């Protein structure tokens, strides 16, 4: 989730971005809980006089989607569109309001590649089998969660995740930025 309070033409505006679905299978109660929760938040903020621009992406380019499409013998794009339609229908039956924008990852590949290239060229990412974001290079990392580097590393260690990011992982707070897909 990302929240950006702004003013646009003299009016208060809250820009809200929430990670959406990967449309390869039926939704579940966790999806419903998450998206209905944000819907309530948006309605509450709007009722207080603040305009909201709500964006929720659709990850329609991902290995689970490709695997399911191969298994079912269908085109991955058709599977994605079908599952998005089911998601919107199911969530609508709960009274959920569709976000203002639901961009598809498939339509954002060029900007994603430009951003990944920029991270790499500025030393915030390194490449081995994939491109990895080195969070330790970003001084503000952890500010949003109010966690220190030490507490994040301790949490990763407690959960058995320290050093499990991938074969190219160097620093402990590394995450994969981009990887090859198996479409």
Image (tube, rainbow, N blue to C red):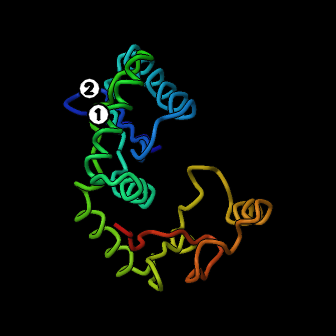
Q: Identify the element where label 2 is drawn.
A: strand
Q: Which residue is mark 2?
A: 11
Mark 1 surroundings within 10 Å by alpha-carbon count, few (fewer than 14), some (14 through 19), many (20 or more):
few
Above or below — where is 50 with respect to 182? above
Q: Position of residue 25 (x, y in %)?
A: 45, 42
Going 56% across and 50% down the picture, which residue do you hit?
144
Disc 1 and disc 2 in contact, CB within 8 angstroms: yes
Going 76% across and 59% down the picture, which residue do you hit?
159
Q: Nearer the viewer, residue 68 or 103?
A: 68
Going 29% across and 34% down the picture, which residue do you hit?
7
Above or below — where is 156 with respect to 122? above
Going 50% across and 70% down the picture, which residue do you hit?
176
Q: Position of residue 11 (x, y in %)?
A: 26, 26
Q: Nearer the viewer, residue 112 or 71?
A: 71
Left or right of 106 in this view: 160? right
Q: Nearer the viewer, residue 53 or 143?
A: 53
Q: Which residue is mark 1?
A: 7
Left or right of 6 in this view: 126? right
């Amino acid at each position: 989730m990302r929240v950006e309070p702004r003013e646009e033409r003299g009016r208060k505006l809250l820009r809200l971005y929430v990670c959406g679905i990967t449309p390869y299978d039926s939704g579940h109660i966790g999806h419903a809980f998450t998206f209905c929760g944000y819907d309530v938040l948006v309605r509450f903020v709007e009722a207080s006089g603040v305009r909201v621009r709500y964006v929720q992406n659709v990850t329609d380019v991902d290995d689970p989607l490709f695997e399911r499409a191969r298994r079912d013998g269908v085109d991955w794009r058709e599977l994605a569109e079908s599952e998005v339609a089911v998601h919107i229908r199911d969530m609508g039956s709960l009274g959920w309001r569709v976000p203002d924008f639901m961009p598809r990852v498939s339509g954002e590949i060029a900007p994603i590649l430009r951003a990944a290239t920029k991270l790499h060229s500025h030393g915030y990412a390194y490449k081995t089998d994939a491109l990895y974001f080195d969070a330790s290079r970003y001084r503000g990392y952890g500010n949003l969660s109010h966690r220190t580097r030490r507490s994040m590393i301790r949490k990763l260690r407690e959960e058995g995740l320290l050093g499990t990011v991938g074969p190219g992982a160097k620093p402990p707070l590394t995450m994969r930025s981009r990887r090859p897909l198996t479409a």
